[in-house]
Amino acid sequence: MKLLGIGSRIEHPEYGKGVVTNVSSQYYWVTFMDAGLETIDIDADFEVIEAIESEVDSVSFFDVESSLVKILEKWSDTHEKVAISDKWRGGKLILEPGDAMANKEMPIDTFFHKIVMVRDRIRVMEQKINSSKNLDDQEKVDLQQYITRIYGSLTSFNVLFKNKSDHFVGTKSK
């Protein structure tokens, strides 16, 4: 079914003759000669007297949401929801200094979130390096090796992650 554009003329069995004055992805706003302004479903039963080609780009909410999610994934620091291991949920991290100073406590969920943000920002940096037009291939390889070493330095935090697929992975020993 082709969408009618603003200015199209229709005849509705209940409201009579009218002109389409607005269009959305689900409705026509039609000003009828006798009934005034009414909103009708796009797939309602009516006769088209004169069709004006639609200039409306009707997009569903799902399409808009999907596009927004793709944009955020591409340009945001965070790309996915990462689950903390159940045994740590609700726990706290306690840093105990070697001298007489007070301990530093923080919810482990907060610490976990910071670790995930570090990981995501390293991934963004990796993407920017790989897509850079200012670096030659050898420079990209050199920088990639540093990133791999950074991941390796962070592997001790893998104990916090629920899913193994979220773990930091450095260079594999041979």
Image (cartoon, rainbow, N blue to C red):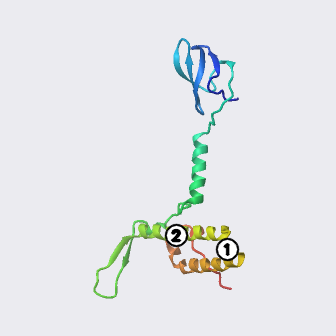
**Residue for point 33% across, 76% down:** 104
Pointers 1 and 2 in contact (CB under 8 A)?
A: no
Residue 56 position, x and y percent, is: 63, 34
**Residue for point 70% across, 79% down:** 138
Check disc 2 and report its element: helix, strand or loop.
loop
Closer to the camera, 83 or 43?
A: 43
On the rendered image, what quadrant is the N terminus found in?
Answer: top right
Check disc 1 and report its element: helix, strand or loop.
loop
Q: Residues within 10 Å of mark 2 (few under 14, many from 20)?
A: some
**Residue for point 56% across, 56% down:** 72
156 vs 50, left or right, is left
**Residue for point 65% across, 81% down:** 172
Residue 76 position, x and y percent, is: 54, 60
Q: Residues within 10 Å of mark 1 (few under 14, many from 20)?
A: few
Closer to the camera, 95 or 12?
A: 12
Mark 1 belongs to which amino acid? Leu
Tell me, for residue 8, which label it has, or none.
none
Circle 1 residue: 135
Closer to the camera, 85 or 166?
A: 166
Closer to the camera, 26 or 76?
A: 76
Circle 2 residue: 161
Taking the view exactly as shown, the residue that stands out farthest to the front is: 134
On the rendered image, what quadrant is the C terminus found in?
Answer: bottom right
Relative height, residue 41 to residue 119 (above, below): above
Relative height, residue 100 to residue 157 (above, below): below
